[in-house]
Image: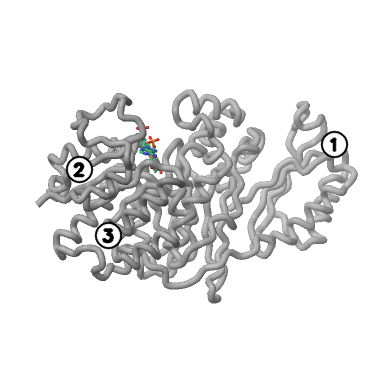
């Protein structure tokens, strides 16, 4: 007997899902047992590329959830509300949910997971991070025996596209962004991507799964690429690095609650680092665990086909369980697939963490400056890996010298006090850029 699927949304992702369900040939036979029953859209008049029975469409998402023929609800409409309330409504109705909505899961994941556990239904989210890359199931199941040390990734395709072009062409951020918008790689309002919020949503989700407990989304230190300058990308390249918007979740000890350093910021990666070769709109996630070591997941991070691939995998997971057990809502859930929390996590204060840093200083072009900068770092206990003066006589550099320093790994508080001392030096015009370095 067919398993009824209801879609909330028929946009980029929803249409991709419908296309797979309408063309089961050559795929796993379970795909052929899924039947699209109802689809909610905002505008019934909008032309649709799929050859769908218009009777399937409704403007009422509630009608989709409440339809007795709909057994699995797929939320691909986006936004916080009404998406959150609709997911909760489906759970309350005892219907499992598949969603691609990272914004909702990053903010309301705990509430949704609690409701789902109580009602005994699955809420699966493979498409919420990394588009077509399988990363959620691997973290929940395939890597379940590991103690995860670090999850780091390039998980926003728009910013990676912009950074790749800045590096390849030496182009300015604003020019590449405008081009990306023209080409459809960036939204008309790019804030969620370029300010790092989308990546922060995703790393919150990955951290929660990797470490077994929810992470406070609003506490994640987030810096985007919107203030990044082409000259820093160029200097980084000359020093053997590429700049990427990195999202990182790192274990900082073994206490209870588990201390985690979770953050999003532009980062200099050595050119030989596995994430340095991820270009354009692709995504990649590097998981470091004990005992597995380093595992990297790479692929298309967005788009109709890749994201629908992930959504359909979740639908199949639920359909497969239903087929074998015939289980209805309320039956015990598989704790790995349900990703039940099993401990508490706590974000650490950033000033207590240690990192390598890149600093660009604009200074007067005179003898002794490098020595005085070195002294400030030394007095704060910050050891320097390299200090380089660049020829920079253009107006942007203020007509003086530009000095780039890369530090060894140092405590953030010590680094900040060194910077304050350097900023106060008479010869230093400004601390023009400050980026993390791996
Ligand atoms: N696009 C991607 O590559 C991608 C990748 C990973 C995850 N996601 C996530 O997937 C979700 C969907 O993204 P998308 O790009 O497919 O969005 P989209 O193209 O904007 O489509 C949204 C769909 O939802 C419908 N909709 C929106 N509000 C509604 C409402 N109140 N009632 C009924 N229908 C409503 C729209 O109807 P109309 O068609 O009538 O406007 C449209 O069909 C988002 O959470 C997004 O973050 C997207």
Q: CA distance from mark 3 to mark 1?
A: 70 Å
Q: Earlier in the sequence, mark 2 or mark 1?
A: 2
Indicate left or right for 225 with 28 as reference.
Answer: right
Numbered marks: total: 3
Residue 143 visible in the current orientation: no
Which label was assigned to residue 94? Answer: 3
Task: Using the image as rendered, state which of residue 229 and residue 127 is in the foreground.
Answer: 127
Q: Which disc, if any, is residue 36?
A: none
Q: Residues within 10 Å of mark 1 (few under 14, many from 20)?
A: some
Kind of element beneath mark 3: loop
Label 2 belongs to which residue? 37
Res 407 quadrant in image: bottom right
Q: Is residue 181 left or right of residue 399?
A: left
Q: Helix, strand or loop at disc 2?
A: strand
**In the figure, is residue 402 to the left or right of 15?**
right
Q: Up-down: is 367 above or below 152?
A: above
Residue where numbered disc 1 is placed: 365
SS type, badge 1: loop
**Which marked residue is nearer to the observer: mark 2 or mark 1?**
2
Mark 3 or 2, nearer chain start: 2
Estimate the x, y position of residue 404 in percent, counting from the top left.
72, 43
Residue located at (49% from left, 32% from top): 187
**Label 2 CB-ligand 1 distance < 8 A:** no
């Amino acid at each position: 007997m067919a398993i009824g699927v209801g879609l909330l949304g028929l946009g980029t992702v929803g249409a991709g899902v419908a296309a797979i369900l309408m063309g089961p040939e050559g795929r796993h036979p379970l795909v052929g047992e899924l039947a699209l029953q109802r689809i909610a859209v905002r505008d019934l008049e909008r032309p649709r590329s799929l050859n769908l029975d218009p009777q399937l469409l409704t403007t009422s998402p509630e009608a989709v959830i409440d339809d007795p023929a709909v057994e699995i609800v797929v939320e691909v409409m986006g936004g916080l509300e009404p998406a959150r309330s609709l997911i909760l409504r489906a759970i309350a109705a005892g219907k499992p949910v598949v969603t691609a909505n990272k914004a909702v899961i990053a903010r309301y994941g705990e509430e949704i997971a609690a409701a789902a556990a109580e009602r005994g239904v699955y809420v699966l989210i493979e498409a919420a991070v990394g588009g077509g890359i399988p990363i959620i199931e691997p973290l929940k199941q395939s890597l379940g025996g590991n103690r995860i040390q670090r999850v780091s990734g390039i998980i926003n395709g728009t910013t990676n596209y912009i950074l790749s072009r800045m590096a390849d062409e030496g182009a300015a951020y604003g020019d590449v962004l405008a081009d990306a918008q023209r080409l459809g790689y960036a939204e008309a309002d790019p804030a969620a991507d370029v300010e790092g919020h989308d990546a922060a949503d995703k790393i919150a989700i990955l951290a929660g799964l990797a470490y077994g407990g929810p992470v406070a989304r609003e506490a994640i230190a987030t810096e985007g690429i919107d203030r990044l300058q082409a000259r820093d990308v160029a200097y980084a390249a000359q020093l053997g690095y590429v700049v990427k918007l990195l999202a990182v979740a790192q274990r900082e000890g073994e206490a209870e609650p588990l201390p985690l350093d979770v953050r999003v910021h532009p980062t200099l990666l050595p050119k030989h680092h596995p994430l340095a070769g991820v270009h354009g709109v692709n995504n990649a996630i590097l998981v470091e665990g004990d005992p597995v070591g380093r595992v990297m997941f790479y692929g298309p991070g967005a788009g109709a086909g890749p994201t629908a691939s992930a959504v359909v995998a979740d639908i199949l997971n639920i359909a497969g369980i239903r087929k074998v057990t015939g289980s209805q809502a309320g039956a015990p859930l598989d704790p790995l697939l349900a990703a039940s929390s099993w401990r508490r996590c706590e974000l650490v204060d950033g000033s207590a963490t240690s990192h390598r840093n890149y600093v660009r200083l604009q200074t007067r072009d005179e003898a002794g400056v490098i020595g005085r900068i070195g002294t400030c770092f030394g007095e704060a206990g910050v050891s320097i890996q390299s200090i380089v003066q660049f020829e920079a006589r253009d107006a942007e550099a203020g007509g003086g010298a530009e000095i780039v320093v890369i530090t060894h790994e140092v405590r953030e508080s010590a680094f900040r006090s060194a910077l304050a001392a350097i900023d106060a030096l008479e010869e230093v015009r400004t601390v023009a850029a400050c980026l993390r370095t791996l």
